[in-house]
Amino acid sequence: MTLKIGVIGTGAIGREHINRITKKLAGGEIVAVTDVNQESARTTVEQFNLNAGIFPDDKSLIADGNVDAVFVTSWGPAHEESVLAAIEAGKYVFCEKPLATTAEGCMRIVEAEMKHGKRLVQVGFMRRYDSGYVQLKELLDANFIGDPLMIHCAHRNPEVGTTYSTDMAISDTLIHEIDVLHWLVNDDYKSVQVLFPKRNRYAHENLRDPQVVILETKSGIVINAEISVNCKYGYDIQCEVVGEEGIVKLPEVATVPFRKNATLGSQILMDWKKRFVDAYDVELQHFMDSIKETGEPNGPTAWDGYIAQVTADACIKAQNSGVKEEIVLQEQPSFYKDNVQPTNV
Amino acid sequence: MTLKIGVIGTGAIGREHINRITKKLAGGEIVAVTDVNQESARTTVEQFNLNAGIFPDDKSLIADGNVDAVFVTSWGPAHEESVLAAIEAGKYVFCEKPLATTAEGCMRIVEAEMKHGKRLVQVGFMRRYDSGYVQLKELLDANFIGDPLMIHCAHRNPEVGTTYSTDMAISDTLIHEIDVLHWLVNDDYKSVQVLFPKRNRYAHENLRDPQVVILETKSGIVINAEISVNCKYGYDIQCEVVGEEGIVKLPEVATVPFRKNATLGSQILMDWKKRFVDAYDVELQHFMDSIKETGEPNGPTAWDGYIAQVTADACIKAQNSGVKEEIVLQEQPSFYKDNVQPTNV
Amino acid sequence: MTLKIGVIGTGAIGREHINRITKKLAGGEIVAVTDVNQESARTTVEQFNLNAGIFPDDKSLIADGNVDAVFVTSWGPAHEESVLAAIEAGKYVFCEKPLATTAEGCMRIVEAEMKHGKRLVQVGFMRRYDSGYVQLKELLDANFIGDPLMIHCAHRNPEVGTTYSTDMAISDTLIHEIDVLHWLVNDDYKSVQVLFPKRNRYAHENLRDPQVVILETKSGIVINAEISVNCKYGYDIQCEVVGEEGIVKLPEVATVPFRKNATLGSQILMDWKKRFVDAYDVELQHFMDSIKETGEPNGPTAWDGYIAQVTADACIKAQNSGVKEEIVLQEQPSFYKDNVQPTNV
Amino acid sequence: MTLKIGVIGTGAIGREHINRITKKLAGGEIVAVTDVNQESARTTVEQFNLNAGIFPDDKSLIADGNVDAVFVTSWGPAHEESVLAAIEAGKYVFCEKPLATTAEGCMRIVEAEMKHGKRLVQVGFMRRYDSGYVQLKELLDANFIGDPLMIHCAHRNPEVGTTYSTDMAISDTLIHEIDVLHWLVNDDYKSVQVLFPKRNRYAHENLRDPQVVILETKSGIVINAEISVNCKYGYDIQCEVVGEEGIVKLPEVATVPFRKNATLGSQILMDWKKRFVDAYDVELQHFMDSIKETGEPNGPTAWDGYIAQVTADACIKAQNSGVKEEIVLQEQPSFYKDNVQPTNV
């Protein structure tokens, strides 16, 4: 049984997913593509030698009877409409972040999905499929270190372009920590505060970099998250959870230890694309497998997309206010409560 | 384009490969199976819900027009005959080690393949596809540490059953180092010596364990390889290459660092199956991809299978003689010289 | 030339220092001791077989013509008076923390010392002599990572007794970070905020544990310091400085890496006394050497003692207020500015 | 009680020890010096501002009534005569390696010492006082990994001068492993074999470098020791002991971990002098302390010096013969058997 997939948006991430489905993973087939740039859609079909229809827009692609599931890999502001249309049509959706650009938009998707009656939507938070985070989650769930009390984490990029703005440190960068951390500790955020240390001399003029975001959860976990997007030295994701009896930490990427030039070292990745390349594979394979096995995707839900958006909004508010801001979520519908994402994927 | 695969031998490794092709990798389909135990073949077809014919024996499976490639995953002594039959029929072959149980048998396959005129056979030495070894190879090929002078390596298993005999330390265990190390340094073995340290008290009565195997290559690289199959603490593969200007080493498996009970630690695998699970995936995907792209597999060749067998024979001779034994290979046919296995797989 | 030392306070730390001077270091001799418990003083003289006078109180010991320098190792509230008396008598002073229990008391010492006209006092902040911190300081001073922007640090004890109170997390525990961190980055503190995460179940009823202290310096460095005094797993001091171009971190204590029981690990100290045992040695040797070579001690000054006290007071205020508190220091007298403590001790 | 020390040989190592006794350690005083170069002796007295007599030769220094102990830090060939003279005079001796340049010479010292009736001599094998080796020894003695079966070790220098010859890899370099390894495992050597890998291009023309020395002990432990004296990257001492249930390894030198320029690294020492600087301190303090406490030094004995010499001779023989050479020691006199060197120094 092959899952027939239509791709909305054939930019970089869209083509990467097409490559995965076509050349690396089992059980999926790209049968339809569309892009606001029709030339991009055509080129993509040729590049991957796809046996796929080229559609004029998302609506027609979603409507096609041959399409079981859609990948929403267009630009962010277009996501909500495509996802709502797919739900309306009863099609499965894998939507890259953001699910929608506003909390209200996310909530409209949540409500549409609940109205439909079963889960159709998975949001592209790939870190939950990273081997390191999965190991952390397993140990935390097994109570290996007792209750978690604090998380120290960091998201560091070697550099960013001049279009990267202070709020993108939240919406484009921290957004991944926002999703993965609450999943890791099975908790919800309560408040956030943002500190701006001395600016890195390599940050462009209008950018506050680095930033320290301090989140507190309902159970009282204090998270301090460093965001550095001009750290120069590499792309580096750190996460350490301090519990009542011990500490667990994301493993370093397994690169070759060397001894040379008076240094005992190992390489740090410079390119973020390589960091979670395996996680993307697992994510998409798992999306297809869970649909086949249970009739529903069971990765990050539309509700997780809503949490991410509300939290990101509060973080940006805290960037501007300089004080602690509350994070107010609606009550989680029971519809989403039984989504138990396996870690042993 | 799907590669249609017939599987000869539906034991543990056969079923694992079927699982990969069916559930994890792109571009292959299991269309035929056979096993000396026909019930095993039938069960396998059911278990994986395969759309595959069940054949009475290897010959009939190989002869089937629907089969593009065969996986030889039967027991070792049966390999040679199946591989020769597949070559005769012009079918691609992925053969688990050993290619044949004797050097002469390997040479018969080499000759049959050369007679056929293009490479059809890949031997299942999966370590060449392990991310750590691939990184080592890239650094060595880039002359990162100058010429290699020594290799210190270890192959450790927590324990073995009572049927495991002293020579199996070579034929079942060291065989993987034998293949991967000469590939790593682009060199051939010249001699071997085996030392038996004090016996581990956990080794069964008839087993010499641990062993230290000292190989020398034609260029003068000295390799000391520890084999410990009752090390108790874990399944652990170590490999350190000492060059003229520095050292590179296989990375540790990336498990979660923890602090607990007065220990800063990380878990060591106990189960060898987990160690190279990703390498097996890459290996089979690469087998299928290279056939599609170039018309030939370009992983470990029949010649590599021959090298492994000759070297293993000399190691076992050295176990018994207690002295240094020569390793005498026939000259490598030019047919195999142009096989440049990519490391960036 | 031997430095003749009188010890005020023969409790645990006093006896440890006597042991150092007598059995491990060069150039000092214990010639006088006193303790509020005269029996303790007598026992100490016997235990170490000292050729030392036993004095009825600090004043008489300080007044003794044979005494060149005094060690103030009595309980905290008694420090100020002893130090002032020693300055009055023109004797060198090595004073364990706190220099005085109030900022005003520290300032009285600062003023007395300035009035005397040369430095006599060194405060017992031993971390500045720890090999790890010294290496960090050297790298920061050499601009190895550019300007420091953030510090992530942690001070963890396995457990504390029931007399340990929430404010002691500052005055007894964080006090060491307070001293060493401003020295490390050549900066002064500007403000502090204290967060209380979920309480560790192992903390006694009246103790808020863990705590997260967020300090900001005048140049804008943001320091987040975790204090955990019931972390169970060990005594663990962490310090990571994030700069504009890289990161440096305190090395782990050099304990034996082992592989056993499915774990790749190394021991974490449980006993804080062992962590800085070498630093104490270097500290006292350096105290004696600098006096001999320059006529003044050049370790942590009375002014450093004042900084520590003002900062600790602000931290405790922040514990209670829940909001950010300013840290207001008087201007540093030029008298102290030329104290360049060497790192290559 | 001060140990009054006479120093025979005021070259580099002699002056370093004088510096230690004078400026870093407790309980010793340099009261006499001599050197074949009298000008060196005079300069040394001035440099360290010693209150010490300058003697014309070793005999007169040893004879001086003020001298309790002598440090033999002259060149190797002169050691034996000085040590024998000191024993004759009943003076304690700390003798840098070699104890004597021949096994016979060592045996003459052993016999002289036994005739004297108590231990007077300690040989300068400082590694036994290195914190890392001490930890290894404690774990091995506590049976932490069961019986030791193999040792993998390496002694690497960044480079050597043109006067360094192939045999010096044994007598000057491996000699430290020879001493420390048999102490570590409480065993004696039985045989040795030397392999010469491909020569490092940085080795000078007449030097075989690297070398692999394979030692076997009476209990069957197999030791493979790599010697590389042109490794370029640093001064690096590695030692890993493989036991029946686990592995323990010398810790890396505790240098600051950094992240910079795409590298997670830490510095490797280039200068061998820094590697064991602390061990030298502990060694000399322990020499003085044990004499004071027990009337005898209890570090490495004259017998250990004899073992080292016999073993080194066999290694050099094996370098030349290319085959396994036996290591034949006389039976250890009971006089030396009760020397239990403490590890908790």
Image (spheres, coloured by chain):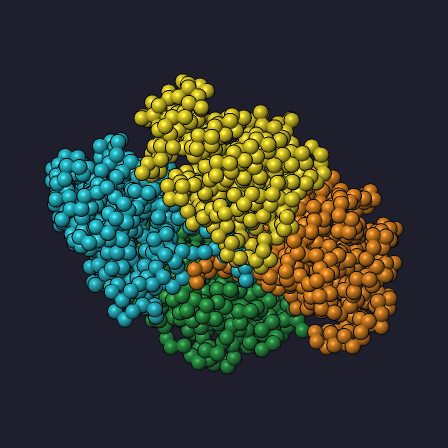
Chain colours: A orange, B green, C yellow, D cyan
Q: Position of residue D199 (x, y in %)?
A: 32, 68
The quadrant of the picture occupied by the N terminus of chain D is: top left
Q: Residue at x 26, y 63 (%)?
A: D164
Res. C254 image quadrant: top left
Residue A140 appears in the rendering: no
Is A150 drawn above or below residue B289 in the view shown?
above
Question: Which of C246 and B243 lies nearest the eye of the viewer?
Answer: C246
From the viewer's perspective, tell me whether residue B265 is left or right of residue B325.
right
Count of residue discs: 0
From the viewer's perspective, tell me whether residue D64 is left or right of residue D160.
left
Q: Residue at x 62, y 64 (%)?
A: A271
Q: Position of residue D104 (x, y in %)?
A: 13, 50
Res. C38 image quadrant: top left
Q: Residue at x 20, y 39 (%)?
A: D69
Is B78 drawn above or below residue B90 in the view shown?
above
Q: Position of residue A242 (x, y in %)?
A: 61, 41
From the viewer's perspective, tell me whether residue D148 is left or right of residue B74.
left
Question: Which of C171 and C272 lies nearest the eye of the viewer?
Answer: C171
Res. A234 image quadrant: bottom right
Is C241 drawn above or below residue C197 in the view shown?
below
Residue C70 appears in the rendering: yes
Q: Position of residue C282 (x, y in %)?
A: 41, 41
Q: Residue at x 53, y 50 (%)?
A: C249
The quadrant of the picture occupied by the C terminus of chain D is: top left
